[in-house]
Image (tube, grey):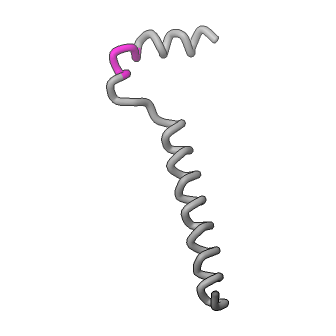
Amino acid sequence: MKKSKKIFFILSLIFILIMLYIAYDINKRTTWPGSDINLKERITKELDK
């Protein structure tokens, strides 16, 4: 494999890993829209802690 192909492969792998990390982080910080029904219960549980 040529040096330029190796560099491209490494950079694309790093980019994909960064994008996966960002997607995971956003997923952890947000809630599913269908869970809004229990919003009042969740808020009171979090405030009680």
Q: Residue at x 64, y 74 (%)?
A: 10
**Image quarter in which the C terminus is found:** top right
Nearer the observer, 30 or 46 = 30
Q: Main secondary structure of the magenta part?
A: helix
Residue 26 is covered by the magenta coloring: no
Tally of numbered tags: 0
Residue 31 x, y percent position in the rendering: 43, 30
Please state which of residues 48 and 33 is positioned toward the viewer in this rendering.
33
Residue 40 figure quarter: top left
x, y percentage for residue 25? 56, 44
Which residue is pictured at 52% across the width and 37% down the height? 29
- The vertical placement of 4 against 45, above or below, is below
- Residue occupying the far front of the picture: 1
Residue 38 painted magenta: yes
Q: Specify the segment rendered in magenta.
A: 35-39
Q: Is residue 10 above or below residue 30?
A: below
Residue at the (50%, 44%) spot, across then down: 26
Q: In the rendered view, tell whether residue 48 sits above or below residue 19.
A: above
Seen in the picture, residue 47 relative to 30 is either above or below; the reply is above
The residue under the point 64% across, 87% down is 1
Across and down, in percent, residue 47 comes to: 57, 13
The x, y position of residue 9, in whole percent, is 59, 76
Residue 4: quarter of image:
bottom right
**Rendered image quadrant of residue 11:** bottom right
Q: Give whichever of 19, 2 is nearer the camera.
A: 2
